[in-house]
Image: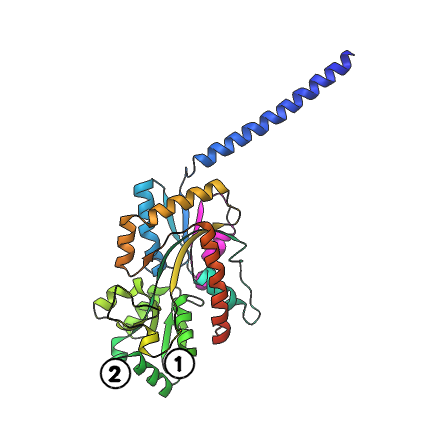
Amino acid sequence: MRSGLSKALSLSGKVFTIFAVLFLANAQSSFAQSDYPNKPIRYVVPFPAGGATDNIARPLQNELLNSFKWNVVIDNKPGAGGNIGAEIVAKSAPDGYTWLMASVGTHGINLPLYTQGGGKMPFDPIKDFTPISLVAELPNVLVLNPEFAAKNNINSVNDLIAYAKAHPGKINMASSGNGTSIHMAGELFKTMTKTYMVHLPYKGSPPAVTDLLAGNVDIMFDNLPSCINYIRAGRLKALAVTSAKRSPAFPDLPTIAEAANLPGYEATSWFGIVGPANMPADILNKDSTTLMAAINSPSVREKYLAMGAQPVGNTPAQFSTFIKNEITKWTKVVRDSGAKVD
């Protein structure tokens, strides 16, 4: 009898211990997540400092630090059209302490572009990430080296098309890398105008713009924030924007669609924050709420509008749907253009 009672008490003690351990573990986990973030967040920007992606990231970083006391550290990891930085985040722990500044390249264009012809992607843009918020959208702008434009009497988009048709393969077209919106804006232009220009991919917009300014390349479909000051200073010649509507930053600059009678031409850029797949719901909600407030703060909005970008801010569900639609859209563009990784 005593033996049975002893066994029962022993068993009860073990059960109690197990429940106590589980309770404490859950309590500690809940405390840790409610205390989030209690250390720096690594904010991976998959393009060089000074480019459009980096320019969009930094005002947000400053607002998160100044208004919310979140220590967000930007880590530039350029290369492979943004794939190097994106892969780092895809393989990180889903604890909220690693973000990616995703773009139309990493989460729209690269999947069809890099897999066309049997290639592989180092990550799945849907399965390997948790969408948090779309940050901003902006147009690209068709810019030329002024000396190249003057030498060949190119003062409009139609002038450029005529010169390209008369000199196939003689125009060098720089981009910030394979699969970026800058690359695909050019490929779409070539397809719709039936012209051939040589694509020269760089590791980001800054080195490409440097060569464009120096006359080492002729033209570029650059993100507006990367070249806006050069346009205003007259160091680059702007012909048109790639968006469906004119940019408020340059209201007198036509769209390519209207300038060259190319209805349907549109190739805009966007930037948003994603984390690794399977982020905890409470951390995701906190990230989403805080980022929405930061994106729509007067400070961030003012900086974005000044560089020609439109601040957005949306929910994880809305951003997830947006990414899926972008992949569908750019899959068709890539296939129709025949673009591939050079």
Q: Position of residue 277 (x, y in %)?
A: 52, 49
Q: Quadrant of the N terminus?
A: top right
Find the magenta span and give its range: 79-103
Determine which quarter of the picture holds residue 201. Answer: bottom left
Q: Is residue 87 left or right of residue 208?
A: right
- Is 81 magenta? The answer is yes
Q: Position of residue 292 (x, y in %)?
A: 37, 48
Q: What amino acid type is highlighted by mark number 2?
A: Lys
Q: Where residue 36 is drawn, which disc sits there? A: none
Return the disc, 1 or 2, that comes first in the chain's sequence.
Answer: 2
- Is 247 magenta? The answer is no
For the residues marked 1 and 2, what is the alpha-carbon distance in whole angstroms?
A: 22 Å
Disc 2 residue crowd, few under 14, some 14–19, many 20+, Cα 10 Å? few
Dot 2 falls on a residue whose secondary structure is helix
Provide the residue designation for mark 1: 193
Q: What amino acid type is highlighted by mark number 1?
A: Thr
